[in-house]
Amino acid sequence: MNSEKGHLIGNVVEGSIAEEMNIEPGDRLLKINDQDIGDIFDFQYLVQDEHLDVLILKSNGEEWLLDIDKEFDEDLGIEFDNGLMDNYRSCSNKCIFCFIDQMPKGMRDTLYFKDDDSRLSFLQGNYVTLTNMSDKDIDRILKYHLSPINVSFQTTNPELRCKMLGNRFAGEALKKVDRLCAPGTGIELNGQIVLCKGVNDGKELERSIRDLAGYIPNLQSVSVVPVGLSKYRDGLYPLEPFNKEDAEQVIDLIESWQKKVYAEHGFHFIHASDEWYFLAGRDFPKAETYDGYIQLENGVGMMRLLIDEYNEALEVIKSEHAQHLLSVKRNISIATGRLVYPCIKAMADKAMELCEGLKVNVYEIVNEFFGERITVSGLLTGQDIIKQLKEKELGSMLYLPENLLRSGEDYFLDDLRVSDVEKELSVDIGISKCDGHELAALLFDIPVEETY
């Protein structure tokens, strides 16, 4: 718990139970049902009850004991100043593939913080290595039935895992999965393997997939993503980038296991991230292969979903907005990373074929800041966008994908704001979600709800 008494309330949701009870930002939560609250795990568990005695310390120093009756699992509408209601746990590993170790000096402090907190896994979907989890943490996950928990496995070879994570306890930590996946726990997990060439690929990857399949049904999915290598690797473990042949071998192995698992369990379980298909030059799998896009945040199936949504939207626009297409007169631009550039360019070409009055300039931004091996859009910086678009034809609007920006903020990784880029390029900037319907709506200047 914080050094001050209780947990500071940062916001109260409008129309919520908390607002009805006159709980306000600046108040502090002291106890629920006479029990102390250590962190968000305790809070989430205690507030499920239908009857609550909530002890609040008001900002004027008064203590209020509130008698609250509600539906089971109904939210109180309290948001805390600290989302975990406790200090964040930093990572104690020294992973050979850690991207934070590959960043240049001089960036904002928050970018260098390495979290390895199981509570962030539950709340935000972050992946944890298990090395920072105590037996008490496992006990609470089981007691409170907190799931899903997202786990960075990397390998199921204990000795190799110690080497990859730079932690002599990393292999032993895998035993915590046995407890989480024991019969009857009901805890759901998702997994991730960051693949490093010549380290945990090939036979080691096959071993990991085989071992992890033994945790089905608790373990619902595992994604395999290639290690990201920036140009700032002096003094770090020597890692090489994957090539086309490597990507083909990874895909072949994963797809062979998908067939085995699907025949036995009815879902595909192990997934290759989109980067492998780009690198191999292969078409993306069909939508049903992604098991409801359970690993979308890891870049698994993102392009298949985007393409399918976009094509669906175009069909609606062709049938429902034919007159509008005749009146469109637009010259706009899209900037994106090297990885997805071919797909976005193909989408823009489709739009221009459909509408003679539409011109879309699609620009591929090379990541000079982190190095050309970094090809994903989410790690592009404002300065690279400015430098590479300075003399380009941008038209009336430049669209950028929202994953370039910090969640809920308007600045890039290098701290340049959207307004800074607008000023330097003398163009208005629009931010697009990674959504095919929204992309189509932006191109044709149609409300997104009219593309369904």
Image (tube, rainbow, N blue to C red):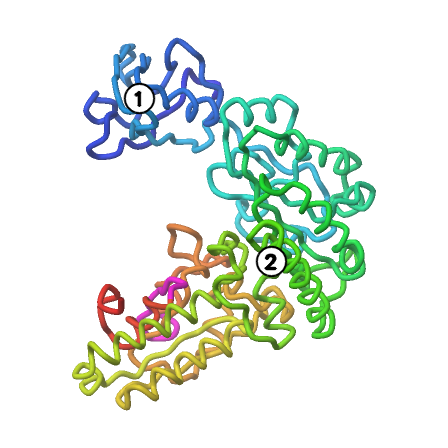
Residue at 70% x, 74% y: name it: 244
As drawn, 414 above or below 173: below
Residue extent of the magenta highlight: 423-435
Question: Could you tell me residue 289's position as x and y percent?
Answer: 53, 61
As drawn, 27 above or below 207: above
- On the image, numbered disc 1 is attached to which residue? 27
- On the image, numbered disc 2 is attached to which residue? 271
**Element type at marker 1?**
loop
Residue at 61% x, 26% y: name it: 138
**The C terminus sits in image quarter:** bottom left
**What kind of residue is marked 2?**
His
Residue at 57% x, 29% y: name it: 185
Q: Residues within 10 Å of mark 2 (few under 14, many from 20)?
A: many
**Element type at marker 2?**
strand
Q: Residues within 10 Å of mark 1 (few under 14, many from 20)?
A: many
As drawn, 146 above or below 277: above
Question: Could you tell me residue 382's position as x and y percent?
Answer: 46, 65
- Along the line of sight, which residue is nearer the eye, 425 or 190? 190
Q: Nearer the viewer, mark 1 or mark 2?
A: 2
Q: Is residue 167 left or right of residue 39?
A: right
Question: Could you tell me residue 52's position as x and y percent?
Answer: 32, 15
The image quarter in which residue 183 lies:
top right
The image quarter in which residue 448 lies:
bottom left
Q: Is residue 276 left or right of residue 420?
A: right
The image quarter in which residue 69 lies:
top left
Question: Could you tell me residue 13's position as x and y percent?
Answer: 26, 34
Could you tell which of marks 1 and 2 lies nearer the N-terminus?
A: 1
Q: Hey, which residue is sitting farthest front in the picture?
A: 263
Using the image, tell me which numbered label, if any, was put on residue 292: none
